[in-house]
Amino acid sequence: MLAVEGLSKEYGPETRVIDDLSFTVGRGASLTIIGPSGCGKSTLLYIMAGLMRPTAGRVLIDGNEVVAPSRQVGFILQDFGLLPWKTVKENLCLGMRIRKMSKEEQESRSRDILAYLGLELHGDKFPDRLSGGERQRLAVGRALVLEPSLLLMDEPFSSLDTLTRERLQNTMLEIRSQKELTMVTVTHSIEEAVFLGDSIMVLGGRPCNIRALIPNPGAGDPDYRNREQFFEVCRRVRRAVEAP
């Protein structure tokens, strides 16, 4: 379980971006976070990933405080974070090399993940030879190959066209279910937040605070976009985002 307790972050006496946030995400659950640009959403993810320290409060994963990057956490950046001078397979193996896994283990895991994501024919290509959707799948694979229990995503599909974006959202539902992942996703898209999140947290203000935490029991169903409940939750989220 992920627990955020009294979290605050400031970059100076006059620049507090997060103020006293507290929430939990159960094991295997999916939380989506939405709010205006600059309200601290990405900063919150970086703190949860152990890449940034809070000014006050703490983040716990299964009861252990996060003070540095953890093997339990996978992080997918908005720009994919791929190295253009390395091949698909080399990008996929980067985290495993950093963790000094054996070459045999790297080979086995990378082969399985490439096949799982439909990239098995692209291992020797460079990222610029891939489509946007393929690059995104590679970024997902690079996180999954480390077998995290918590996956953090920062606007992972924002640069993709609508149909590719929806296909990858469906893929993330399948991955979450099959691998029992806990997921936290930052997005600017109301529809994406409602499709992916068991609950939707709306942030606002400066410093940011929780404006609303909206339950979303229909999430996880691939057909959810076509249901009236989906549109009703979208309307609730929109009202919360637009509230003064």
Image: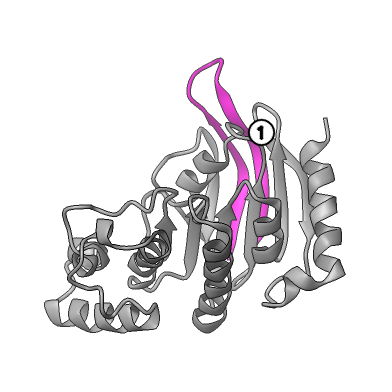
- Numbered marks: total: 1
Residue 10 located within the stretch drawn in magenta: yes
- Quarter of the figure with the N terminus: bottom right
The magenta segment is 1-25
Badge 1 marks a residue whose secondary structure is loop
Structure colour scheme: one colour
Question: At x 80% / y 65%, what residue is drawn?
Answer: 230
State the quadrant of the C terminus. Answer: top right
Q: Is residue 70 visible?
A: yes
Q: Where is residue 149 in the image (x, y as percent from the top left)?
A: 47, 70
Q: In this view, does 233 lie above or below 54?
A: below
Side (left or right) of 13 relative to 93: right
| Residue located at (62% from left, 47% from top) | 5
Along the line of sight, which residue is nearer the eye, 58 or 208? 208
Q: Please tell me whether residue 243 is drawn above or below residue 219 in the rendered image.
A: above
- On whether residue 215 falls in the magenta region, the answer is no
Residue 231 rendering spot, x and y as whole percentages: 82, 61
Magenta region's main secondary structure?
A: strand
Q: Where is residue 9 in the image (x, y as percent from the top left)?
A: 54, 32
